Amino acid sequence: MATSYVKESELLSFFVYDTRLGLKEGTEEQKILYYHPDNESVNKKVRNVGLCEALVNFTKTFNPDRPCQAVHTDRKRQVFLEPEPEIWTVMTVSIPWVEQVNNGERTVQYIQDYVQDEVLETALQRSYSMFKLFHGSYTDVCNQAGQEGLRARLQRFYSRYLQTIDVDKLDIFSIFQGMQFLPLDKYMYLKAHCFVNLVETTYRNIQRTVFLYGDQLVWSGLGQEDIQIFYQYLLTWLFPNWASENPALVASLNPLSQHSSLSLSSPPISSSLPASHPSIALTNVTGPGGFILGQPGTGDQRKSPWVYVTVDGLLQGCKLFVFNVGSATMCFFVKSLGKNSPSADFCKKLGTFLNPRLSQISREIADFIAKSKTPSTEQLYKYVYFNEMNLAVKSSRSSRRSPSPSHHISPEAMRIIIDLNREYNELDEGETIMRTLSDFWVVCRKSGHRRFFVILTQKNANFAEINEEVRKLCQREFTNIFFLD
């Protein structure tokens, strides 16, 4: 009788090294700024870093601008990133495998196709961007705190951050790192925008503001690169942690919380579409608001952290304050003089100013959403949409709260989408319609900066019927978006 066992992909190692250090024989260990796992022997760390450096130097002879990006072996996959000159970050993951035992004979098959370079490269870039958000660039930290100070910050940050990386769950949403925008009419959007302007005019030391309703973005004053990583931080770290600390509050505010994809007891995640912050978009909300981050007199978990965002073309350190009323959340990047944090009096005045006004806007947005809500129906398709210009992402998975498995995209379909997405990186427009061996259809369409993927499970449909279904889907879900036919 045959039995089988499946081993999923997992993170094996992650390290950061500086090629300008440890140039003399016997000092090679100085190159290493951070290495995970820490319990590896020094000789193994030096050997692995040396091999990676040699691979990079060798491939530079063929293409100096784009040296080694990935290394494939039977059992491992390794990806490389040079986020800053001469500083390299390398991540190694295992290849998933299937073990079968038949009549006492054991065979192991490694499944190379289950690990795709693009998702790993995105995860590596995201790890650096998240560090940069809270500490600044490697070079800036080194200039301020020295090499040992940089090592200490890397150790403190990555020892926690790497625990959130689930290699097996990285997918097309990880690559896009897009944002869900709240669809408002002109009146409601302008009202929200005017309120943001009022806050920034009243409190001049607020450099930038981000406004969300539930897990959807209403307004952002940050640049694209900054809001992209900050949005991921909110949805994969801050909001889940806040919800886990306040489960009674979340449940009382959110009648849909039992259907939410957010697990209140789970640690921060890093996967596909980030877990949603509990949303109360379909009900009016009353009650006082408060600071999620920045409340004076609270513990370390609730203190206002330093974050580094681009202001007027320069990376600038700001204090982050996050204020929540019901479903409405406002994030403020506050300029501080030196290392002096804004006073408790500033926080008290800001909270008093925000509470009634933000409560009113939250109620008005809730009423608007309730009026514009359309009943959802079960469909035979799943879709993913992404706009490269504004980083807007929309999917059948993110537009529904139902936990039904039919709304999830299968791993096989997800791998096909990732492959198609890579091929379309070099094209301005085009369309692909394909039928898989599993008898489902995949449609990929790109028009300008917009990408659109559809998975249909109509096994007996023909080409013309699939094309018609996609046309109807575009009319129903994307009435204001132009796709070339």
Image: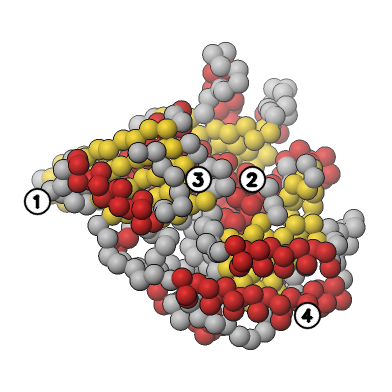
Say what secondary structure mark 3 lies in: strand
Of callouts 1 and 2, which one flags the residue occurring earlier in the amino acid sequence?
1
Residue at x 64% of width, y 59% of height = 219
User: Is there any visible trace of residue 140 in the rendered image?
Assistant: yes
Spatial distance from mark 1 to mark 2, Cα to Cα? 54 Å
Of callouts 4 and 2, which one flags the residue occurring earlier in the amino acid sequence?
2
Whether tag 1 and tag 4 are in contact, CB under 8 A, the answer is no
Of callouts 3 and 1, which one flags the residue occurring earlier in the amino acid sequence?
1
Of callouts 4 and 3, which one flags the residue occurring earlier in the amino acid sequence?
4
Quadrant placement of the C terminus: top left
Residue at label 1?
A: 1
Spatial distance from mark 4 to mark 3, Cα to Cα? 38 Å
From the viewer's perspective, is the residue at label 1 or at label 4 nearer? 4
Of callouts 1 and 4, which one flags the residue occurring earlier in the amino acid sequence?
1
Spatial distance from mark 4 to mark 2, Cα to Cα? 32 Å
Residue 115 position in % (x across, y down): 38, 40
Say what secondary structure mark 2 lies in: helix
Answer few, some or many: residues within 10 Å of disc 2's Cα (few below 14, many 20 plus, some between 14 and 19).
few
Residue type beneath disc 3? Asn
Q: Indicate which disc residue 387 carries.
A: 3
Of residue 428 and residue 206, the one placed in the foreground of this image is: 428
Answer few, some or many: residues within 10 Å of disc 3's Cα (few below 14, many 20 plus, some between 14 and 19).
some
Residue at x 53% of width, y 73% of height = 368
Residue 110 position in % (x across, y down): 30, 38
Whether tag 3 and tag 1 are in contact, CB under 8 A, the answer is no
Residue type beneath disc 4? Thr
Say what secondary structure mark 4 lies in: helix
